[in-house]
Image (spheres, rainbow, N blue to C red):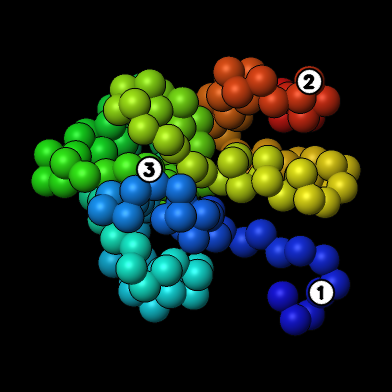
Amino acid sequence: RAAVSIPVFTSSLLQLPLIARTIRPDQKIAVLTAFKHRLTSEMLALSGLPLDAKVVTESIETTVEFQNLSSLPMDTESFRSRLEEAMARLLEANDDIGAILLECAIFTPYAAPLQRKFNLPVYDFVSLINFAQSVVSSGRTLELANEIAGSLDKNMKESLVSEMEERRVGKECRSRWS
């Protein structure tokens, strides 16, 4: 941040302070992450997580679907199922979860299905981008979206476009991702 003169939005974890202040104090934030062991207490503190906030984490890093992301086409339905199973495990162990944060950008297409299935607010990279877009130029946000889109495989792009349509993201942004 010190090297630039614009707002910097680097991780969906930046939403943790907001989430913590919008759920009841006795509720926990469920974080679905790519690599659970990398989400340390130090990283949570760097995100600005309040000391009194409670976080529980789960990952799908050991699943075949996640491990094969770089070598096989993505099976989006199986991937969604694995995320739902991970969230169900968290809810089974914690009946006091008030919100879900998807820490990995690859999880973004599954925000709406998770929200519908578990009836909880879901925050992800898109909600962070929407916030960023509301405070900076929309053109710069679209540039970022295009950079991200360039690195995704066809199935992931299709899932993201579908998610954007479901969230009613602007036509201009959808057309750049298609």
Instruction: In the rendered view, tell whether residue 168 sits above or below residue 44.
Output: above
Q: Which residue is at a point 44% across and 67% down the rendered structure image?
A: 49
As drawn, the residue found furthest toward the bottom would be: 2
- Which mark, residue 171? 2
Q: Which residue is at a point 76% across and 44% down the rendered structure image?
A: 133
Say what amino acid the circle numbered 1 marks: Val
The x and y percentages for residue 56 are 26, 56
Q: Which residue is at a point 85% across and 72% down the rendered structure image?
A: 5
Side of 117 relative to 143 (left or right): left
Image quarter hosting the N terminus: bottom right
As drawn, the residue found furthest toward the left would be: 93
Side of 63 relative to 42 (left or right): left
Q: Residues within 10 Å of mark 3 (few under 14, many from 20)?
A: many
Q: Is residue 38 visible?
A: no
The answer to whether the residues at label 3 and label 2 have Cβ atoms under 8 Å apart is no
Say what amino acid the circle numbered 2 marks: Lys
- Front label number (3 vs 2): 3
- Which mark, residue 4? 1
Say what amino acid the circle numbered 3 marks: Ile
Q: CA distance from mark 2 to mark 1?
A: 30 Å
Q: Earlier in the sequence, mark 3 or mark 1?
A: 1
Q: What residue is pinned by disc 3?
A: 100
Q: Is residue 47 visible?
A: yes
Tell me the quarter of the picture where residue 134 sits: top right
Q: CA distance from mark 3 to mark 1?
A: 31 Å
- Front label number (3 vs 1): 3
Image quarter hosting the C terminus: top right
**Tag 1, which secondary structure?**
loop
Q: CA distance from mark 3 to mark 2?
A: 27 Å
Side of 155 relative to 139 (left or right): left
Q: Nearer the viewer, residue 34 or 136?
A: 136
**Tag 3, which secondary structure?**
strand
